[in-house]
């Protein structure tokens, strides 16, 4: 998450805890879900959910400790900080107080299970492919071709190539790379149900962060893609479809950009794809910040006359977000009684 955003939001629910972050230009969104079985002890007190936000550096530094026996985390409903106790193997016990900040808790309005196309590859294979690209390259372009068309034309079924923005400074100094491959040789699984060629660009470093994570935990990388201009989903996956004995799910959403030569003459989307795009149009407006990536995308889109979504990732704001102190959400069954300022809101270790 430290590779994606500067803030992390925490939402504790009765059976799981979700950490989320988004980059400044709102083109990359990462969510990690820790299910109840991940913890030795996990409980909420007199609330159906707890929400808060923290600076990613402060939160990250707490968990950088090595040789740790146990970490206990506690949130209090009237406190503006999260208390963390780290029990080390050498007998040391460290106490931390992480400041809670105003944060907008976002959730995805789209379901990756409805995305028709996907590819699955070993994390090490993806890591080797990304190593061929210039470290100064911001974005890569993926081109997926239906197998029938690839066999008919004799071309590759999959390509990875550099995306060079002419508006970028010193773009002529960046090494341009184009890698072609046969999906049957390089991928574990390739599912392309569309008759059209998929070609879209997304951020290289954000994608690489998920690949590194998958390689670290020994998982494969699943990439779900719909149509150019809609987000791609990147998730870790094992042959069984879930991470064994870890109780952790992760999902990375990356916005894509695509500028057809004549957008008005682009083929219409089939009904299922139109539904997905409608989710983007109906989602609340998210105004990009003045981040570098956001400015580049905006300038490039204006220069080429492309269709620019106001909410490229289709994210919804969860009710009760934007609280610097932990926000409690009582259940519908009974009214939440008044609690002392030092009473626990949530505890897990």
Image (cartoon, rainbow, N blue to C red):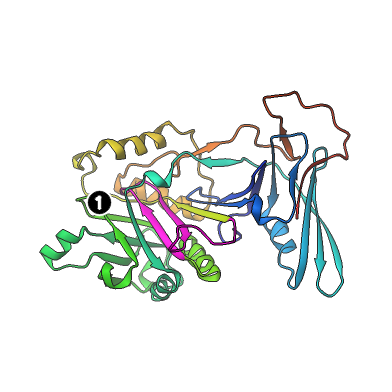
Residue 321 left/right relative to 179:
right
- Write the residue at 51% across / 68% down: 212
- Write the residue at 74% across / 69% down: 65
Residue 156 left/right relative to 25:
left
Question: Is residue 204 in sight in this rendering?
Answer: no
Residue 185 left/right relative to 209:
left
Magenta-colored stretch includes residue 245: yes
> Residue 184's quadrant in the figure?
bottom left
| Magenta segment boundaries in residue numbering | 220-247
Nearer to us in this view, 246 or 136: 246
> Residue 39's quadrant in the figure?
bottom right
Residue 303 coordinates in the image, percent (x, y): 33, 49
Nearer to us in this view, 226 or 72: 72
Residue 146 coordinates in the image, percent (x, y): 21, 57
- Please, is residue 292 above or below residue 205 in the view? above
- Please, is residue 119 above or below residue 340 in the view? below
- Please, is residue 64 above or below residue 78 in the view? below
Quadrant placement of the N terminus? bottom right
- Write the residue at 54% across / 41% down: 107
- Write the residue at 13% across / 68% down: 154
């Amino acid at each position: 998450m430290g590779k994606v955003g500067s803030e992390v939001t925490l939402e504790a629910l009765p059976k799981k805890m979700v950490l989320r972050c988004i980059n400044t230009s709102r083109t990359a969104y990462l969510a990690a879900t820790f299910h109840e079985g991940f913890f030795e002890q996990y409980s909420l007190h007199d609330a159906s959910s707890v929400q808060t936000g923290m600076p990613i550096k402060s939160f990250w530094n707490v968990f950088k400790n090595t040789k740790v026996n146990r970490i206990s985390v506690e949130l209090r409903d009237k406190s503006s900080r999260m208390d963390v106790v780290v029990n080390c193997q050498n007998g040391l016990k460290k106490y931390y107080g992480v400041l809670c900040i105003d944060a907008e808790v976002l959730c995805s309005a789209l379901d990756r299970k409805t995305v028709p196309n996907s590819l699955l590859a070993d994390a090490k294979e993806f890591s080797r492919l990304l190593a061929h690209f210039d470290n100064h390259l911001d974005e890569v372009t993926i081109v997926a071709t239906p197998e029938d068309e690839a066999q008919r034309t004799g071309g590759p079924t999959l390509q990875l190539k550099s995306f060079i923005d002419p508006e970028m400074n010193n773009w002529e100094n960046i090494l341009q790379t184009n890698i072609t491959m046969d999906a049957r040789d390089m991928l574990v699984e390739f599912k392309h149900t569309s008759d059209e060629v998929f070609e879209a660009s997304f951020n290289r470093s954000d994608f690489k962060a998920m690949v590194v994570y998958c390689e670290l935990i020994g998982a494969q990388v699943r990439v779900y893609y719909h149509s150019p201009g809609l987000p791609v989903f990147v998730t870790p996956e094992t042959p069984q479809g879930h991470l064994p004995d870890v109780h952790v799910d992760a999902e990375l959403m990356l916005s894509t950009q695509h500028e057809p030569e004549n957008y008005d003459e682009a083929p219409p989307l089939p009904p299922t794809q139109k539904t997905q795009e409608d989710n983007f149009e109906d989602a609340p407006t998210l105004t990009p910040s003045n981040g570098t990536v956001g400015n580049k995308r905006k300038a490039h889109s204006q220069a080429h006359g492309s269709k620019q979504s106001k909410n490229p990732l289709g994210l919804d704001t969860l009710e009760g977000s934007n609280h610097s102190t932990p926000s409690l959400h009582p259940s519908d069954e009974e009214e939440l009684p008044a609690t002392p300022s030092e009473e626990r809101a949530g505890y897990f270790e």
